[in-house]
Image (cartoon, rainbow, N blue to C red):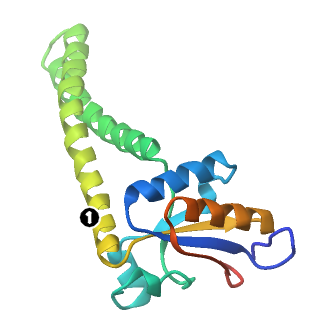
Amino acid sequence: MTMNERGGATREAVGVFADAGSMQAAIDELLASGFGADALNLLASAEAVETKLGHKYRKVAELEDDPAVPRDHYAPVADVEQADRGAIGALAMAGALGAGGAVVISGGALAAAALAAALGAGTWGFFIGEVLTKFVGSDHAEDMEKQLAGGGLLLWVRCADAAQEARAQGILKEHSGRDVHVHSLPAGK
C-alpha cells in the first residue's frame, strides 16, 4: 500500500474538465508546481473501462471515485509523438535495409546499398510515420470525444500530503475543473 507522509492511504484529487485545453492547462501547471507526470492519471479508453467494469458508463461522474476504473498514466504529447515516430521510423528503416540487402545480394556495391537504404528510409519512413502518427492521434481524439459526450475528461492527481491536496485542488479549480475533490484510495491501489 502506498502511504503518504501522514501515514494514511494514498489520497488523490480529482476533477472533471469540459474541454481538452482546460485540462492540459491544469496538467501544465501541476507539472510546473512540482507534481510528477507519474502522479497524473487520465481515464482509459471506453473499451478498457467497459472490459474492466463489465458494463458501459453513461456519465464520467459515475467513475470519479471508483478505484477499479482503468486509468492511463499521463504522458506528455511530445513524448508520445516521439515514441510513435521512433518505432515507426525503426520499422521503416528495417524495411529499407532489407531492400538495400537485396541490392548487395544482387551484386551491387555497398555504397549503392547504403544509398538505397537511406533513400528508402527517408522517403517511406517519413510518409509512414506521418500517416501512422495521425492514426494513433485520431484514436486518442475519439476516446476524448466519447468522454466529453459522457460529461467531461477526468484527471486524477496523487497527493503526498495535505499541502499537495490543497495545491492540486486549487489548480484543478483554477483551470475550470468541476466537481473537484479529494478521496482516499483503498489499500493496494
Q: Judge whether 90 appears above or below 58 on screen.
A: above
Asked whether, in this view, residue 135 is left or right of residue 83, the answer is: left
Q: Residues within 10 Å of mark 1 (few under 14, many from 20)?
A: few
Q: Position of residue 62 (x, y in %)?
A: 45, 87
Can you say which quadrant of the picture contains the N terminus? bottom right
Residue 102 or residue 140, whichever sits in front: 140
- Residue at point 21%, 16% (across, down): 113
- Asked whether, in this view, residue 27 is left or right of residue 140, the answer is right
Q: Quadrant of residue 87?
A: top left
Q: Is residue 58 left or right of residue 113?
A: right
Q: Secondary structure at mark 1?
A: helix
Q: Which residue is mark 1?
A: 142
6 over 175 or under it: above or below: below
Is residue 161 shown to the viewer in this render? no
Foreground of the two, 156 or 79? 156
Locate residue 143, reporting x and y percent: 31, 67
Residue at x 53% of width, y 56% of height: 26
State the quadrant of the C terminus: bottom right
Examine the rendered structure and indicate whether residue 131 appears above or below residue 45: above
Question: Which residue is at 54% across, 85% downward?
Answer: 66
Choose between 96 and 135: the one closer to the eye.
Answer: 135
x and y, in percent, of residue 15 in the image: 53, 71
Question: Residue at the location (57% across, 65% down)?
Answer: 173
In the rendered structure, which amino acid carries the disc numbered 1? Glu
Can I make out residue 186 in this image? yes
Residue projecting furthest to the bottom: 55
